């Protein structure tokens, strides 16, 4: 009798303590270093291992009935769509989705956020729970070393054109900035693998005081992740590199820009 009374008092205390969302286990996007090629130039860069699932776990206390709880989500402060899988026998969903288990003893709803297996996005994930007009929220994190996209083909442009090179990084936490470097290649040597390899070993930091290009930041991106040319010159022909690092690792990506002379008719 006293045991049952104790359990009942514990339940009552948990319910009366009110709705509260707490982060339980953070997630990690698994990455690895892979060997890649750009126009015959081999180098190594980081990639995401999409075979490893990424989950972030939360617990919601003070829940009387999980069916009365509504859930919403934010990533880095922006609202996102997450499908809700309420039972274990429900179909596995694509994209970002949540699953849950409920403890009637502790009146705790455990919620697991499953990030899109094909392209998990690292960041700060906030779970917002509402029940009986009361709202609580808590943030968990999906951490990741920085990863750039892989550029596999040269960018062919005309002298005098406007052009943007974007090295958008997927990372959490975000790096402080993207660092650019450049090595010139003669237009007549753009098909010469030896010339491209030599340029790789002659990469130097890109000057920031030129008048025909500027460093910019893309919407929601990392500082200086965009290199915008206002008036391409033949001297801009060559190999470009972007580099970034955080306490979780670093990444490096290469791009070739082939500037063709503007033929006058």
Image (tube, helix red, strand yellow):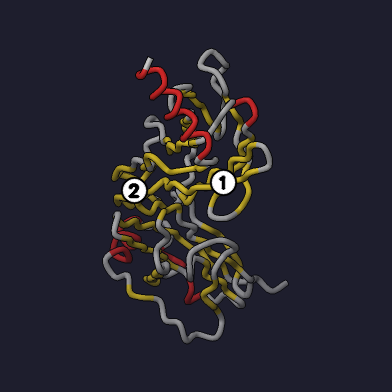
Q: Which secondary structure lies at badge 2?
A: strand
Determine the image quadrant of residue 129.
top right
Q: Judge whether residue 2 can be spotted in this image.
A: yes
Residue that appears at 34% across and 56% down: 251
Residue 170, how many percent across, how many down?
Answer: 45, 52
In this rendered view, identify the residue nearer to me: 70 or 124.
Answer: 70
Position above or below: 33 against 158: above
Q: Taking 204 as reference, is 16 left or right?
A: right
Q: Which secondary structure lies at badge 1?
A: strand
Disc on the earlier residue, 2 or 1:
2
In this rendered view, identify the residue nearer to me: 67 or 258.
Answer: 67
Determine the image quadrant of residue 86.
top right
Residue 32, how many percent across, how many down?
Answer: 30, 42
Of all residues, the one furthest to the left in this rendering is: 201
Residue that appears at 37% across and 49% down: 144
Q: Taking 130 as reference, is 101 left or right?
A: left
> In what quadrant of the picture does the C terminus appear?
bottom right
Tell me the residue that label 2 is attached to.
Answer: 46
Residue 33, how many percent across, how many down?
Answer: 29, 45
* Front position among marks 2 and 1: 1
Residue 74's disc number: none
Position above or below: 168 against 128: below
Tell me the residue that label 1 is attached to.
Answer: 136
């Amino acid at each position: 009798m006293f045991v049952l009374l104790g359990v009942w008092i514990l339940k009552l205390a948990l319910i009366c303590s009110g709705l509260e969302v707490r982060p339980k286990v953070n997630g990690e996007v698994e990455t690895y270093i892979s060997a890649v090629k750009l126009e015959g130039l081999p180098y190594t860069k980081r990639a995401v291992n999409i075979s490893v699932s990424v989950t972030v776990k939360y617990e919601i206390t003070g829940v009387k009935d999980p069916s009365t709880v509504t859930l919403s989500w934010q990533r880095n402060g922006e609202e996102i769509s997450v499908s809700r899988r309420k039972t274990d026998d429900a179909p596995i969903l694509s994209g970002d989705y949540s699953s849950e288990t409920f403890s009637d003893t502790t009146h705790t709803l455990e919620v697991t956020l499953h990030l899109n297996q094909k392209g998990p996005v690292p960041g700060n994930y906030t779970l917002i729970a509402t029940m009986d007009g009361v709202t609580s929220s808590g943030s968990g994190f999906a951490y990741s070393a920085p990863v750039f996209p892989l550029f596999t083909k040269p960018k062919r442009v005309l002298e005098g054109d406007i052009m943007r090179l974007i090295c958008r990084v997927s990372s959490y936490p975000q790096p402080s900035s993207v660092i650019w470097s450049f090595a010139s290649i003669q237009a007549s040597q753009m098909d010469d693998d030896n010339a491209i390899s030599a340029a790789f070993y002659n990469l130097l930091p890109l000057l920031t005081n030129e008048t025909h290009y500027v460093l910019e930041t893309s919407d929601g991106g990392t500082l200086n992740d965009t290199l915008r040319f206002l008036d391409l010159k033949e001297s801009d022909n060559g190999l470009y590199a972007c580099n970034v690092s955080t306490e979780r690792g670093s990444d490096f990506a290469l791009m070739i820009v082939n500037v063709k002379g503007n033929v006058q008719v």
